[in-house]
Image (tube, rainbow, N blue to C red):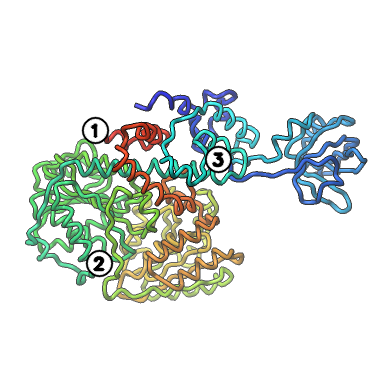
């Protein structure tokens, strides 16, 4: 149960003054559902203004507050602007300019002959000083003194700056002092304000210390919760498994294991031999052989007399894993099955029976394998593919499926920088596959200007005529999925004119059956070219596909470009990746594309990506979802997370955990940032 003293912060925003159904919608779009969300809706930036006695004291281009008296209205013919001519105290003239047809509002705000205080940016049009659409108009100077440093909030359709600021102030009125959860020595050393002051200051101006303190709180809550998960996990009893190798020696592997694979397998084997359930993350670059490591781990479970399950994020990936594993397992006699939401009737019944009586050793599937109706005889290992789609909460849910808590191995194909690994998987041990299997050819990566589109299509025609396949990934168009879609549909239509039925289209808005059918055509080789948006991670393994074209490549983050490039280079043939770039390239975009040409080391790319994005240009903003945080930005995560991690460890190991004064305060912190699954574990355990 959430502590009572936090209840005022968790009141729904619909209970606030002035919030009706029309305003609730844009608020919900921004994730502002409760008072707490509004209090933490920090300004994106601040507009600094200077109060001046008259226009002589102001400079063009400056944001000012000044008193003027309107003396004349001037309408322009047609769609031209409406101007209010006004004079200041010494008699200087200012044109206050409005665009748009409705002049009534301007006349009402600025009646002739009445002195008004206006705030806005001073510009010059010809010889005339002007202010276009003033930010504020007021009857008295005092009302605008608060606008000298004005917070600017991110908005959605239907929410104005003024309304956002009013609601934030209402929310801050509900904020009361809370006991301190930060270690006192650290608080002094960093010169951070107390929590409530930090929240108020962060909305008032560029208070770096206040914003750092709020970011640190969020990072500390996260570190603490992950530590609680880890401790609770160690206290649980799992199944101690010892494989004798009888099945693994019979495996039909496509190539000899790399040193990194052997090291990871032995780390996993060591974990599975313990009674405490394993929680391990397997990070591997694209094509580094994660599947083989997962298979060896699952066979340790089967040799030990237990069952294993592999969970994939999509049906296509589940099917692909199943086919790959089945081929390798053929000589072992191990019973493996595929289970997805599509299985119905007798087929489904038979799988459910096999899992319950233990005749199925390994089950591969989508979320269907963890539905309530599914029971296992002795599930002792769960492998989760594409880990980043799973929160800690879901990992904990899976843990309820075995008689005892199963061992858990999570795999991600996106090498994650160390800081972010700590943020998202702080409760897990990490194994890294940082070597490529022998025989993998490097992918020839080239940057091509979009003006050479004709040449690219010509090269694509030759490529398809030679019997090989290709991917064409369409650009990310800002934040808007419908625009992404339009870009993909348009490119698909154009490429179909050249190549007819050889082209298939896949995007996130298609129904699963249509999407799967298009993918199947491509996998079977009936379609030579797959056009896709990034909404789908092109997770299919088609060795015959040896060309990847990424349009508007400068808009993607490095990690994403690397992921997409890794879809080719999976067979014997030489593969090429063409990065089509637009004509306007920022410095960050240039560095990003140069790095892609220079290296194929995913771990290096991940670190550089974090540095480039931490530099303030969050290009491909969707990727900001790479972090589980709302308050802390990338730069703060890098700088403050190690501190928070150490502080959390100190609290758990030296300061008595969640007991004692600081522990009680830390409990409030966990609820405040909704990391209360950490507290639930304490209760459950």
Tell me the SS state at disc 2: helix
Tell me the SS state at disc 3: loop
Nearer to me, 150 or 178: 178
Is there a contact, CB below 8 Å, between mark 1 and mark 3?
Answer: no
Nearer to me, 131 or 483: 131
Query: Going 43% across and 40% down the picture, which residue do you hit?
Result: 184
The answer to whether residue 46 is left or right of residue 380 is: right
Q: Residues within 10 Å of mark 3 (few under 14, many from 20)?
A: many
Gap in angstroms between the C-alphas marked 2 and 1: 37 Å
Q: Earlier in the sequence, mark 2 or mark 1?
A: 2
Q: Residues within 10 Å of mark 1 (few under 14, many from 20)?
A: few
Q: Where, quadrant-wise, is the N terminus in this rendering? A: top left
Whether residue 501 can be seen here: no
What residue is pinned by disc 2? 260
Q: Where, quadrant-wise, is the C terminus in this rendering? A: top left
Q: Residues within 10 Å of mark 2 (few under 14, many from 20)?
A: some
Whether residue 176 can be seen here: yes
The answer to whether residue 452 is left or right of residue 545 is: right
Residue 588: x percent and y percent? 55, 63
What residue is pinned by disc 1? 684
Query: Going 55% across and 52% down the picture, which residue do you hit?
Result: 478
Q: Earlier in the sequence, mark 3 or mark 2?
A: 3
Query: Going 49% across and 53% down the picture, which residue do you hit?
Result: 635
What residue is pinned by disc 3? 42
């Amino acid at each position: 149960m959430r502590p009572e003293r936090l209840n005022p912060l968790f009141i729904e925003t619909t209970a606030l003054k002035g919030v009706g159904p029309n305003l609730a919608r844009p608020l919900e779009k921004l994730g502002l559902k409760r008072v707490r969300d509004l209090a933490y809706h920090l300004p994106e930036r601040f507009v600094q203004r200077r109060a001046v006695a008259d226009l002589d004291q102001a400079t063009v281009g400056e944001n000012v507050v000044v008193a003027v008296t309107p003396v004349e209205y001037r309408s322009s013919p047609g769609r031209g602007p409406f101007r209010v001519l006004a004079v200041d105290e010494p008699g200087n003239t200012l044109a206050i300019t409005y665009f748009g047809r409705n002049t009534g509002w301007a006349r009402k705000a600025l009646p002739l002959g009445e002195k008004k205080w206006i705030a806005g940016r001073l510009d010059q049009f010809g010889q005339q000083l002007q202010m276009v659409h003033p930010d504020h108009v007021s009857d008295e100077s005092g009302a605008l003194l608060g606008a000298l440093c004005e917070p600017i909030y991110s908005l959605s359709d239907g929410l104005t700056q003024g309304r956002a600021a009013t609601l934030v102030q209402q929310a801050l009125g509900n904020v009361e002092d809370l006991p301190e959860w930060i270690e006192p020595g650290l608080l002094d050393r960093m010169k951070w304000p107390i929590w409530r002051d930090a929240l108020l200051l962060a909305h008032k101006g560029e208070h770096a210390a206040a914003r750092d303190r709020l970011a640190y709180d969020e990072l500390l809550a996260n570190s603490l919760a992950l530590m609680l998960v880890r401790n609770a996990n160690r206290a649980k009893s799992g199944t101690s498994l010892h494989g004798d190798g009888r099945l693994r020696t019979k495996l039909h592997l496509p190539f000899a294991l790399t040193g990194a694979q052997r090291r990871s397998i032995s780390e996993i084997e060591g974990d599975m031999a313990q009674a405490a359930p394993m929680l391990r993350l397997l990070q591997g670059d694209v094509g580094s052989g994660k599947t083989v490591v997962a298979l060896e781990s699952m066979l340790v479970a089967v040799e030990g007399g237990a069952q294993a399950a592999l969970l994939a994020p999509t049906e296509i990936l589940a099917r692909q894993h199943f086919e790959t594993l089945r081929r390798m397992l053929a000589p072992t006699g191990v019973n493996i099955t595929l289970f997805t939401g599509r299985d119905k009737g007798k087929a489904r019944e038979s799988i459910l029976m096999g899992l319950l009586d233990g005749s199925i050793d390994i089950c591969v599937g989508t979320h269907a394998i963890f539905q309530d109706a599914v029971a296992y005889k002795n599930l002792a290992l769960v492998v989760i593919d594409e880990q980043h789609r799973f929160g800690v909460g879901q990992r904990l849910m899976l843990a309820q499926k075995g008689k005892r808590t199963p061992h858990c191995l999570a795999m991600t194909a996106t090498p994650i920088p160390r800081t972010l690994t700590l943020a998202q998987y702080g409760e897990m041990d990490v194994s890294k596959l940082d070597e490529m299997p022998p025989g993998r050819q490097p992918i020839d990566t080239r940057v091509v200007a979009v003006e050479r589109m004709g040449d690219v299509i010509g090269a694509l025609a030759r490529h398809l005529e030679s019997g090989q396949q290709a991917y064409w990934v369409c650009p990310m168009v800002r934040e808007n999925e419908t625009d992404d879609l339009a870009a993909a549909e348009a490119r698909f239509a154009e490429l179909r004119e050249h190549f007819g039925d050889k082209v298939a289209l896949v995007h996130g808005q298609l129904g699963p059956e249509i999407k799967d059918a298009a993918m199947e055509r491509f996998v079977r080789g009936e379609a030579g070219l797959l056009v896709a948006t990034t909404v789908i991670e092109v997770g299919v393994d088609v060795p015959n596909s040896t060309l990847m074209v990424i349009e508007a490549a400068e808009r993607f983050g490095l990690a994403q470009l690397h992921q997409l490039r890794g879809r080719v280079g999976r067979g014997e043939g030489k593969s090429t990746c063409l990065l089509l770039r637009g004509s306007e390239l920022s410095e960050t975009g240039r560095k990003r594309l140069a790095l892609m040409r220079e290296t194929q080391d995913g771990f290096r790319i991940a670190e550089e990506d974090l540095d480039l994005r931490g530099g303030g240009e969050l290009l491909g903003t969707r990727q900001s979802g790479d972090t589980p945080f709302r308050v802390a930005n990338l730069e703060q995560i890098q700088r403050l997370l190690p501190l928070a991690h150490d502080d959390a460890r100190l609290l758990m190991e030296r300061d008595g955990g969640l007991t004692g004064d600081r522990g009680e305060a830390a409990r409030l912190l966990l609820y405040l940032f909704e990391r209360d699954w950490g507290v639930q574990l304490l209760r459950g355990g």
